[in-house]
Every structure is written in structure tokens, then in C-alpha cells.
Image (spheres, rainbow, N blue to C red):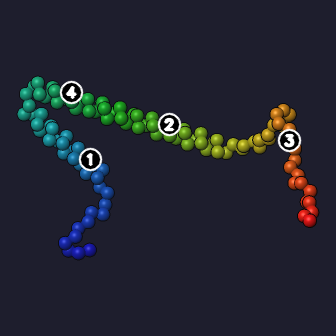
């Protein structure tokens, strides 16, 4: 690489997002000290709702994961089952079936 070109080769977005959340949480505790009681109550309600929402999303993700695992197990069981050979029914009704025979060769003369 050149001295002028810089590239970020890692995937640290999750770590960065967690760090940002921790910083926001620390800043909020400092802000709470300077807020009026009404604002503080409102902010506590917002934080409580966020925590409940996150807990709900975690529960839904866990449920989806369990359903996916069950689905994969069902697919594996279904895959291991042997398929029976199917045999067609003998038709005893409908059109008359006649074997095609080409006409006898005629002499051209």
C-alpha cells in the first residue's frame, strides 16, 4: 500500500456499537444529575421502555432460533425417510390402446 492510502481491514462495528452504548449510558448518568425531576422521570421511563424492548427482541430472537433448530431437525428426519416406489394404476377404461405398426413395405414399380 502507498503512504497515502489507508484501509480498514477489520470488522469491529459490533465492538464500536457496544462502546458507543456504554459511553451514552455513562453520559446519561451525568445528565440525570442536572435534570429537573420531571425530565428525570421522563428519561427514566424512556430507558425502562428501551430495556423492555431489548428484552422482548432477545426473547423473539431466541424463539426464532429454536424454531429454526426444530425445522432443521424435521428436515433431517424427513431426508432420512425412504420413499416408496410408486406404481401406476392399470387403466381399464378410456381409449383403446393399440400398438402402432408401420404399414408393410410396398414395391415401387
Q: Nearer the viewer, mark 3 or mark 4?
A: 3
* Residue bearing mark 3: 97
Quadrant of image for the C terminus: bottom right
Question: Crowding at label 1, few (<14), some or many (≥20) Cα neighbours within 10 Å?
Answer: few
Badge 2 crowding class, 10 Å Cα cut-off, few under 14, some 14 to 19, many 20 or more, is: few
Q: Is 45 located above or below residue 5 in the figure?
A: above
**N-term mark: 4 or 2:** 4
Q: Residue at x 11, y 24 (%)?
A: 38
Label 3 neighbourhood size at 10 Å, few (<14), some (14-19), many (20+)? few
4, above or below 90, in the image: below
Real-space CA distance between mark 4 and mark 1, rounded to the nearest whole angstrom: 22 Å
Whether the residues at callouts 4 and 1 have beta carbons within 8 Å, the answer is no
Per the image, label 4 sits on a secondary structure element best described as helix
Mark 1 or mark 3: whose residue is earlier in sequence: 1
Residue 11 lies, in percent from the top left, at 31, 57
Q: Residue 4, image x and y in percent?
A: 19, 72
Q: Which residue is mark 2?
A: 67
Label 3 to label 4: alpha-carbon separation:
81 Å
Comes first in the chain, label 3 or label 4: 4
**Which of marks 2 and 1 precedes in the sequence?**
1
Residue sitting at 19 percent across and 40 percent down? 25
Q: Nearer the viewer, mark 1 or mark 3?
A: 3
Structural distance between the alpha carbons of marks 1 and 2: 28 Å
Check if mark 3's residue and mark 4's residue have beta carbons within 8 Å. no
Depth-wise, is mark 2 or mark 3 nearer the camera?
3
Q: Which mark is residue 99?
A: none
| Secondary-structure class at tag 3 | loop
Q: What's the CA distance linking mark 1 and mark 3?
A: 76 Å
Question: Residue 64 placed where, x, y %?
Answer: 45, 37
Q: Which residue is mark 4?
A: 45
Q: Which residue is mark 1?
A: 18
Question: Which comes before the other along the chain, label 2 or label 3?
Answer: 2
Amino acid at each position: 500500500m502507498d503512504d497515502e492510502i489507508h484501509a480498514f481491514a477489520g470488522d469491529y462495528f459490533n465492538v464500536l456499537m457496544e462502546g458507543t452504548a456504554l459511553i451514552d449510558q455513562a453520559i446519561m448518568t451525568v445528565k440525570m444529575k442536572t435534570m429537573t425531576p420531571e425530565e428525570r422521570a421522563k428519561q427514566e421511563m424512556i430507558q425502562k421502555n428501551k430495556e423492555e424492548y431489548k428484552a422482548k427482541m432477545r426473547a423473539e430472537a431466541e424463539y426464532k432460533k429454536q424454531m429454526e433448530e426444530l425445522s432443521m431437525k424435521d428436515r433431517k428426519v424427513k431426508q432420512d425417510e425412504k420413499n416408496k416406489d410408486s406404481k401406476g394404476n392399470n387403466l381399464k377404461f378410456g381409449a383403446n390402446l393399440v400398438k402402432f405398426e408401420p404399414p408393410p413395405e410396398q414395391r415401387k414399380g
